[in-house]
Image (tube, rainbow, N blue to C red):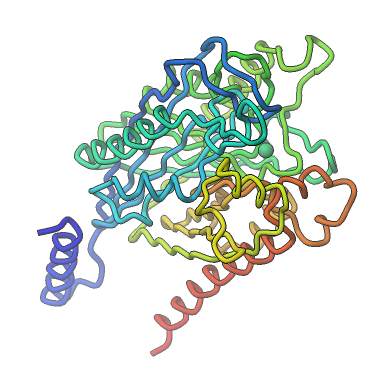
Amino acid sequence: MSFRQTLRIIGVLLLLLRTCTGFTQIPAHIKAAAGKIEITPKTSVYLAGYGIGRKSTGVHDPLSARCLILEVNGERVAFVSCDLIGIFHRDVEEIRRQIKTLTPDHVMISATHTHSGPDTLGQWGPNLAVSGVDKVWFTETKHEIAALVDRLSTKLEMATLTCGVSGDAPPISKNIRVPRILDREVGVLQINGTSGNSIATLVNFACHPEILDTRQITADFPAALYRTVETKTGGVCLYLNGAQGGMITADFDETETPRGQNWKAAEKLGSDLGNFVLNFLPQLKPLTPKTLTLQHKLFTVPMENPRFIALTKLKVFPPELIKNGEVETEVNRITLGDCELLTLPGEALPNIGLYLKTKMHGKFKFLLGLTNDELGYILTPEDFVLDLYKYEASVSVGEQMSPRMIENLLSLLTSQMSQGKKTLSP
Ligand SMILES: [Zn+2]
C-alpha cells in the first residue's frame, strides 16, 4: 500500500470517527521535525551571482540545506531552504520526484540567494556559452536533499507552534533603487517540542545575501543568523528570503573595506538579525491550526528575454526551460491557522510584495521568495519599461511575469475565500 493510500484510509477513518461520535472537531495533532545537511561542494566550482568565470578558491563557512516538516492532522508540508543562488523548477521537480514520504507539491524548496555559492543555474561558467553548473555535485546534492526530507518524515514529534511578524526589523536592509519602498517586516515561526525544546525557527526577511564577493564559498550574512539563533535555541534555523528584488540589499558602511570583502559586516548583519529574532521569540503568539491547507498552481509565462532564450538554445540553461515559447512555473499558498504563506518563483520587487501582503488574509503574512523556481526579477509592466529598472528587466522573463504571477496568487486567495463562504452558507 502506498503512503498516499494509507493517508487516505486514515483520513476516512478519522472522518467516520467524527461522524459516529458526533464530535464536530478533533483536536489538532501537530507534529514536526527539522534537520540540516551540508551541501558545500568538495572541489573548486564556478561561483554564482556576479560575473562569469569566478572559480572558488576555498570555503569560509559551509553551505547547508535546512528542512522543516510540519504535519497537522496527517497533512504534511516540507520547507527546505538552501544556501544557493536559486533553483530552477525543473531541479525542484527532480528533488520532489525522489521524495517518497510527501506529496510532491507539498515540498517547498527555497534558495537564500547567496552570491558566494556554486552556480546552480548555468549562467556563470567559464564563458557565456558554457554552463557553470558542477553537474556531479548538483545531482548528488538534489539526491541528498530528498533523502533529508524522507529521513525527517520518520522523526516527526508532537509540537507546538508560535508565530509573529514584527514591522520593526533592525536597520540592516535598504532599497538602492527607491529607498522609501522597503518592507522591514520579519516573520518568525517557532516550532517547539512538547518538552519546550526548540525544533526549528523559521525566519522570513527580504534581503540580498551579497555582502561578500571574494572567491571564498560562504552563505553570506545568513551564516551568522543561523549560528546566533541555533547557539541559543538548539533548534534548526531556516532563512527564507522575501520579495527582495530590485533592489533590496544589505545596509552597511561600504566605504570601510574594498567592495565584497567586509566579513565583519556579514557577521554583524546576520547576528543583528539573529539577536532580533531571539528577542522577538517571547512575543510570538500561539498558533493552533485545526488544519494545514495547501494550494498549488502551475502557470505559464511567455519567455521574452533574448538572453535567456539564447542561453537555453546553448543548453547553458536547461533546454526544457522554454516550451512553445513559454516557461512553466508555480505559486503556492499555505495556511497554518493565522499564519499564511505565499511562494514566489523568483525575485519579486518590494512593491509587489507589499501589494500581495494587502491581499492576504492571514494575521501573520509570510512571502517566500525564490521558492520552487528562480526566474529572475519579477517587475510590474509599469516598472519594466523604466530606465531605473533596466538591469532588473534584463534579468527577467519578461513583462508578463508579474501580471501572471499576481493573477495566479490572487486566484488562490479568492478561491480560498469562496470555499470559506460556501462553508458558512446553510
Ligand atoms: Zn538577485
Q: Quadrant of ligand 1?
A: top right
Residue occupying the point 41% across, 32% down: 66
Asked whether the viewer can see residue 275, the reply is no
Q: Nearer the viewer, residue 315 or 271?
A: 315
Instruction: Report the quarter where the N terminus lies.
Output: bottom left
Residue occupying the point 57% across, 50% down: 367
- Count of numbered circles in the view: 0
x%, y% of residue 227?
Answer: 48, 18
Please give left or right for residue 235 compared with residue 409 in the image. Answer: left
Q: Nearer the viewer, residue 163 or 99?
A: 99
x%, y% of residue 107?
Answer: 38, 49
Quadrant location of residue 272?
top right
Q: Residue furthest bottom?
A: 426
Q: Nearer the viewer, residue 163 or 129?
A: 129
x%, y% of residue 241?
Answer: 58, 39
Instruction: Report the quarter where the C terminus lies.
Output: bottom left
Looking at the image, is 160 positioned above or below residue 135? below
Q: Nearer the viewer, residue 363 or 59?
A: 59
Asked whether the viewer can see residue 71, the reply is yes
Looking at the image, is 112 positioned above or below residue 305? above
Residue occupying the point 53% across, 48% down: 373
Looking at the image, is 159 positioned above or below residue 274? below
Residue occupying the point 57% across, 10% down: 57
